[in-house]
Amino acid sequence: MRVFRRLPRVSVNAAVATALILANFFTWGQLLSAAAAPYQVAPIRAPQIESLLAYIRSGEHSGEAWEITLTELEAEQTIAWYLAAYPQIPFEHPQVEITPDYVSGEGDVTLLGLRVHVSGKARITLDEGLPVVEILALSLPLPGSLRQAVESEIQRQLRRADLLPVRFTSAEWRDGEVTVMGYVR
């Protein structure tokens, strides 16, 4: 009994606080170890896009028609290739779903050093040879004003399609793939 008297007395509050901290560490450890690995695809530019770009760069074009069919995987790989070519874009792990009614995408964005999962859904139509994107849903963990600024920037960047060396004549959206037709300017 004298052994127990020599041990320092621990208050009930300190014991409870220690138990809660240990439980918290255990819970975070379980959550982090159970987190799914991010979806990853190889950064490969779709061969059809590669050959169209090579043809445009050759300068030997004059209004020729073109047609490209992309699957979801080819779209994801091309986006991953583009992101690898431009590391200043803080987006990783693109995942795409193509349906007749909309295109949805998701991935991870790094904001202020934190990785955040984001997603969006859009309907893409054509008007006078240019894509028109209607954002149907956008999952951004930002306050309203910042979210509005991001959506405005997305629309501003999409308007730059006028600078593309191609025009689009049609797009056929199906489950899992899209066929786009157009001509080289």
Image: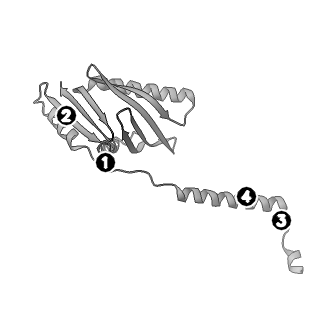
| Residue at numbered disc 2 | 67
What residue is shown with label 3? 10
Q: Residue at x 45, y 25 (%)?
A: 152
Foreground mark, 2 or 4? 2
Picture residue at 61% right of the left edge, 56% below the top: 28
* Residue 16, x across and y down, in percent: 78, 60
Q: Nearer the viewer, residue 65 or 100?
A: 100
Report the residue at 52% width, 41% height from top: 112
Measure how far apart labels 2 and 4 are at the Cα level.
61 Å
Provide the residue designation for mark 4.
20
* First in sequence: mark 2 vs mark 4: 4
Query: Toward which corner of the image does residue 170 lie, by quadrant?
Result: top left
Place residue 14 in its image quadrant.
bottom right
Q: Is 125 in front, or is 149?
A: 125
Q: Which residue was labeled with disc 1?
A: 43
Q: Quadrant of residue 79?
A: top left
Residue nearest the observer in this picture, 5 or 163: 163
Q: Secondary structure at mark 2?
A: strand
Q: Nearer the viewer, mark 1 or mark 2?
A: 2
Q: Residue 30 bears which disc, if any?
A: none
Of callouts 3 and 1, the N-terminal one: 3
Task: Describe residue 60's horizontal placement relative to residue 87 as left or right.
Answer: left
Residue at 40% across, 31% down: 122
Mark 3, other Cα within 10 Å: few <14 / some 14–19 / many ≥20: few
Q: Secondary structure at mark 4?
A: helix
Instruction: Count neighbours of disc 4 (C-alpha within 10 A) and say few if under 14, some if 14 to 19, many if 20 or more.
Output: few
